[in-house]
Image (tube, rainbow, N blue to C red):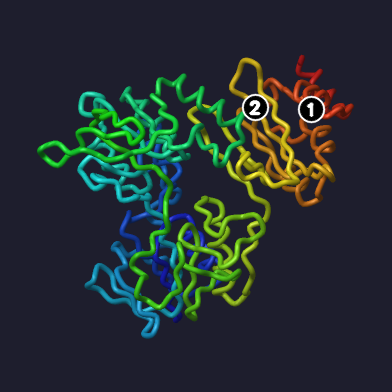
Amino acid sequence: MENIVIIGNGIAGISAARHIRKLSDKRIIIISGETDYFFSRTALMYVYMGHMKFEHIQPYENWFWEKNRIELVRGFVTQVNPETKQLSIDWSRAMHYDKLIIATGSKPNKFGWPGQDLHGVQGLYSKQDLDLLEVNAPNKEVCKRAVIVGGGLIGIELAEMLRSRDIPVTFLVREDSFWNGVLPKGESQMINEHIREHHIDLRLSSNLKEIVADENGKVKSVVIAETGEELACDMVGLTAGVTPNIEFLRNSGIELGRGVKVNRFLETNVPDVYAIGDCAEQHEAIGNRRPIEAVWYTGRMMGETVAQTICGNKIEYKPGHWFNSAKFLDIEYQTYGWVFSERGMKAHEAHFHWRHPEEKICITVAFHKETGQFLGINTFGIRMRHQIFDKWLTQEKSVDHVMEHLIDANFDPEFYKHYEANIISKYNAEFGKSISLKKKSLKRIFAMGY
C-alpha cells in the first residue's frame, strides 16, 4: 500500500488528507508537533477572549481520524532525505514515505532585534503561542502593559485580545498609517481612528529599537527607535508578518526560496514531494497574486488540488480571483479582486471611495481609467456576496454595471440599513455619471423603509 506522509496538520494538510481518503485507500500519515488534532487557527483569538473553549475550535471529533484511517503522529520532522524517501522525527524516529506533502505553514518574523528571545516576547500563530499568552498576559495585574510590534492583521487581533482583558496596549506601526501598504488612504485612516477609539495607544511611524531585560531575563521595557523613548511593559507581541516554516529542509535538496518552490501542480523539484499552504512558493506568481499566500482558503484549495494529483487526476492549481476577509476590532472587512494602496496602484487604475459621515462604514472600488472595467472592491462594515463579485470579475463587467447592481451583491440581513443610494450619488457627482439603481433594487430599498 502506498504511504502518503503529510507534514503539518493545518488546513492545507488536513484538506489534502481528507480528499485523498475520499478518492483512495492509500495509507495516510499526518505528522504535527503542534497539536494532536486539527483546529481552526483563525479562531484562536476567541479562545483567549473567552468566547469558546479550545475543543470548540476543533472541527472534527477525535474519533474522526481513526474512523477514516488517517494516522496521526505527534512530533517535529527534523530532516528529510528524498534519496531514500526517509524522514526523521525529533532526530530519533525514522519514517518511510512514497509521496510526501509538505504543509508546515508559517512562523512569526523576527528581524534580529536585541532582546527578541527574552521571556515575555512571543508571536501569535500556534497553539503554543496561545498557551504562552496565558502565561505572559493572563490579566492586567500580571501584564500591566503590552507592546505590539507590527501593524498587520495578526497585530490588530492580538490588540483586541489583550484589550478584552483590560490590558493596556501600545501598538508600534512603522508605517505612517495603519496597513497602508495594503489599504488605500481613506480606509487606513478610518482604521487608525477606530484603533484609538478602542483605547489602544497607536504609535505610527514608530520602529522597535530593542527589547530590554530585567535582572531575571524577562521583558522590562522596549526602546522606540525614532525617539529613544523607553516604554515599560511586561509582554511584547511580535506580529510583523510571518515567514514559511522550512528551516528543517535546508540540506534536503528540495529547492527553496522564501518558501518551498513549486510549479503550478504544487510539485517540488524532487519527484513525489509536494508543498502546499503557507510554506509553498510559486516559481512564478499566478496573475496578480503573490507567490506565497498565507491565507486559509488558498491552503484548503491547494490541499484539494494536490489530493487529485496524488490520486491519479493531475490538475493545475487555479486559485481564481483574489478575495479575503478579516476583522478590524468590530469592523468587518472584505475584498474582491484587486484594490491596491496608493503605493501599489498601477498607472491605469482609478479609485472611487465612499465613507459614511458618522459610522465606520466605507467602500473603495477600483476600475480601469480608460475602459471602465471593474477591477475590485474593498468593503468595511458592509457584507458582500462572493459569488456575485466573482462572476462580475470573470465577466469583466464595467464599474457602472457594478454600481447599478451594487445592492444585488449586498449580503446583509433583511432589516439592515442600505447605503447604495448614497454611494451612487457620490459616484455620479465625482465622475460626472448619471447611474441609477435598477428598479428591482429600488423596490428592495423602499420595501425596507429606506
Q: Earlier in the sequence, mark 1 or mark 2?
A: 2
Residue drawn at the location 81% of the way across and 45% of the way down: 373
Whole-angstrom CA distance, mark 1 to mark 2, is 13 Å
Residue ID for mark 2: 362
Residue 320, given in percent of the width and then of the height, sits at 67, 56
Q: Is residue 255 above or below residue 372?
A: below
Label 2 crowd (10 A; few <14 / some 14-19 / many >=20): many
Quarter of the view holding residue 289: bottom right
Residue at the outermost bottom position: 84
Residue drawn at the location 54% of the way across and 38% of the way down: 326
Residue drawn at the location 24% of the way across and 48% of the way down: 117
Quarter of the view holding residue 10: bottom left
Question: Which sits in the foreground, 30 or 92?
Answer: 92
Q: Is residue 242 left or right of residue 89?
A: right
Residue 150, given in percent of the width and then of the height, sits at 41, 39
- Of badges 1 and 2, the one in the foreground is 1
Q: Is residue 446 left or right of residue 296?
A: right
Residue 17, given in percent of the width and then of the height, sits at 48, 64
Q: Quadrant of the C terminus?
A: top right
Q: Is residue 28 left or right of residue 437?
A: left
Residue at the outermost front position: 227
Residue ID for mark 1: 427
Amino acid type at image mark 2:
Cys
Quarter of the view holding residue 209: top left
> SS class of the residue under badge 2?
strand
Residue 354, given in percent of the width and then of the height, sits at 70, 26
